[in-house]
Image (tube, grey):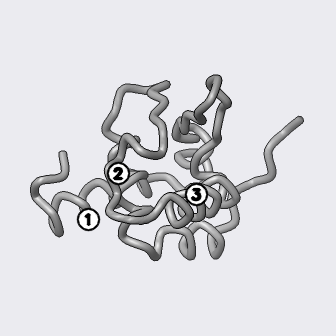
Amino acid sequence: MEKAPLDLGVVLAALSDPHRRRVIAELSIAPEGTERTCVSFGLPVSKATLTHHFRILREAGLISQVDRGNSRAAPLCRHEIEAALPGLLALIVKDANDNNPSVP
């Protein structure tokens, strides 16, 4: 099944939250194909809020989620993002570095 093209408004709404931008920034600088679990990001939010953030990112088409036994891994939809919105990932990483130098 082919994915729907990214919608700029939906993507920007998903990226309006700093926690979600952090997730995308960290996945952007990781080697291609990296999958991380939701809790591996160490976001200071409840489990329910964490689930909400990842649902928003998934529905926006920024990540996908893969079942890995009793957890879910989230890889970045890097190629789809770069094809639809070239340069967006670089801007997100730059923003993360500018606003929080401790983020890689």
Q: Which mark is residue 51?
A: 3
Disc 3 crowd rating (10 Å Cα; few below 14, some 14-19, many 20+) is few
Asked whether disc 1 touches disc 2, contact meaning CB atoms under 8 Å apart, the reply is yes
- Please state which amino acid type lies under the numbered disc 3: Thr
Q: Which mark is residue 25?
A: 2
Cα separation, mark 2 vs mark 3, equals 18 Å
**Which of the 4 image quarters holds residue 9?**
bottom right
Residue labelled with disc 1: 95
Is residue 81 shown left or right of residue 88? Answer: right
SS of the residue at dot 1?
helix
Disc 2 crowd rating (10 Å Cα; few below 14, some 14-19, many 20+) is many
Q: Position of residue 83 (x, y in %)?
A: 59, 45
- Residue ranking furthest to the left: 101
- Note whether 15 is above or below 51 in the view shown: below
For marks 2 and 3, the one nearer the N-term is 2
Choose between 81 and 54: the one closer to the eye: 54
**Which of the 4 image quarters holds residue 85?**
bottom right
Choose between 92 and 43: the one closer to the eye: 43
